[in-house]
Structure formats: C-alpha cells, structure tokens
Amino acid sequence: MNTIRKLVGRAVAIGAIVSLSACAGMGLTTQQRDTAIGAAVGGVAGSALTGGSALGTIGGAAAGGLIGNQVGKR
C-alpha cells in the first residue's frame, strides 16, 4: 500500500511539473506563474503530509498558492 502511495505521489508531482512547464509560452506574469507553482507544490506537500487525504491536498494547494502569490509580487 505504501508503494502505491509513493508511486501516485510521484506521478502527481511529475504531472504538475509537466503541466506548469506547458504554461511557459502562455504569457503569464511572474506572479501568476509563482501562484501556480506554489499551488502545485503545496498540493503535493499537503497530500504527502496527510497520507493522501483530499482535504490535505486542497489545503496545501491553497496555502501554496497564497505563498506563491505573495512571492510573485516582488
């Protein structure tokens, strides 16, 4: 069971990285890009910390998005 969770977590992380790299040519501002990256990283981290619960994933994505948004304001 732990092997499946690790595999799913890695697949989600790779999927997030690939989907964010596709946004490179879309004309996003730095703040929008940082928000998206923060949400993806936060979602993966929230999922990993809570054992894959949906609430942890959503909470992590929200927190990561907020942090990424603030970092992008430079």
Image (spheres, rainbow, N blue to C red):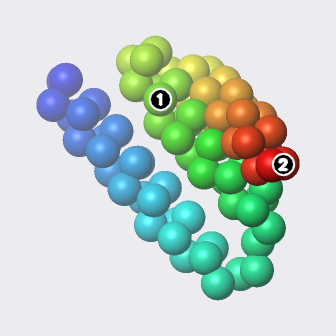
Residue holding disc 2: 73
First of labels 1, 2 by sequence position: 1
Residue 5 against residue 72 in the figure, above or below? above
**Residue lying at the far bottom of the rendered structure:** 25
Q: Position of residue 17 (x, y in %)?
A: 45, 59
Residue type for callout 2? Lys
Residue type for callout 1? Ala
Which quadrant holds residue 32? bottom right
Residue 15 against residue 73 in the figure, above or below? below
Comparing 55 with 14, the one in front is: 14
Comparing 7 with 27, the one in front is: 27
Q: Residue at 27% x, 31% y: name it.
A: 5
Rendered image: mark on residue 30: none
Q: Quadrant of the N terminus?
A: top left
Q: Secondary structure at mark 2?
A: loop
Residue holding disc 1: 45
**Can see residue 5?**
yes
Category of crowding for the residue at label 2, using alpha-carbon neighbours closer than 10 angstroms: few (below 14), some (14–19), many (at least 20): few
Q: Position of residue 61 (x, y in %)?
A: 64, 35
Q: Residue at 64% x, 84% y: name it.
A: 25
Category of crowding for the residue at label 1, using alpha-carbon neighbours closer than 10 angstroms: few (below 14), some (14–19), many (at least 20): many
Q: CA distance from mark 1 to mark 2?
A: 23 Å
Which quadrant holds residue 52? top left
**Can see residue 58?**
no
In this rendering, the label closer to the viewer, 1 or 2: 2
